[in-house]
Amino acid sequence: MPSLKVCHERGIRSVWIDREGEPPNPDWQPDAVLQDLSALPDLLLPIRSR
């Protein structure tokens, strides 16, 4: 999860792909948690339409 820490420190929004069902570190919460990449397009669609 080091990438979540870097995103948190720099104010970058993040999505964690949690294939193993592990809870994220409470200090570095991602903006979204997905079980796999199949849901990513639906998550990003509102951003694309801005």
Image (cartoon, rainbow, N blue to C red):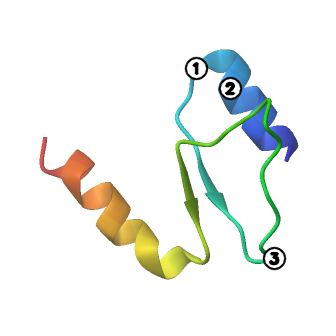
**Residue beneath disc 3:** 20
Figure check: 7 above or below 39:
above
| Viewer-side label of 2, 3 | 3
User: Residue at horizontal 35%, vertical 60%?
Assistant: 43
Q: Locate residue 15 relative to residue 25 in the image: left or right.
A: left
Q: Looking at the image, which is closer to me, 48 or 13?
A: 13
User: In the image, which disc is placed on residue 36?
Assistant: none
The residue tagged with tag 3: helix, strand or loop? loop
Q: Looking at the image, which is closer to me, 42 or 22?
A: 22
Report x, y in % for residue 22: 82, 65
| Viewer-side label of 1, 3 | 3
Label whose residue precedes the other's in the sequence (1 or 3): 1
Q: How many marks?
A: 3
User: Residue at horizontal 24%, vertical 60%?
Assistant: 45
User: Residue at horizontal 25%, vertical 46%?
Assistant: 47
Amino acid type indicated by mark 2: His
User: Residue at horizontal 83%, vertical 42%?
Assistant: 25
User: In the image, which disc is placed on residue 8?
Assistant: 2
Q: Locate residue 41 relative to residue 12 in the image: left or right.
A: left
Q: Locate residue 42 relative to residue 25 in the image: left or right.
A: left
**Residue beneath disc 1:** 11
Q: Are marks 1 and 2 in contact (CB under 8 Å)?
A: yes
Figure check: 42 above or below 19:
above
Q: Locate residue 47 relative to residue 7 in the image: left or right.
A: left
Report x, y in % for residue 8: 68, 26
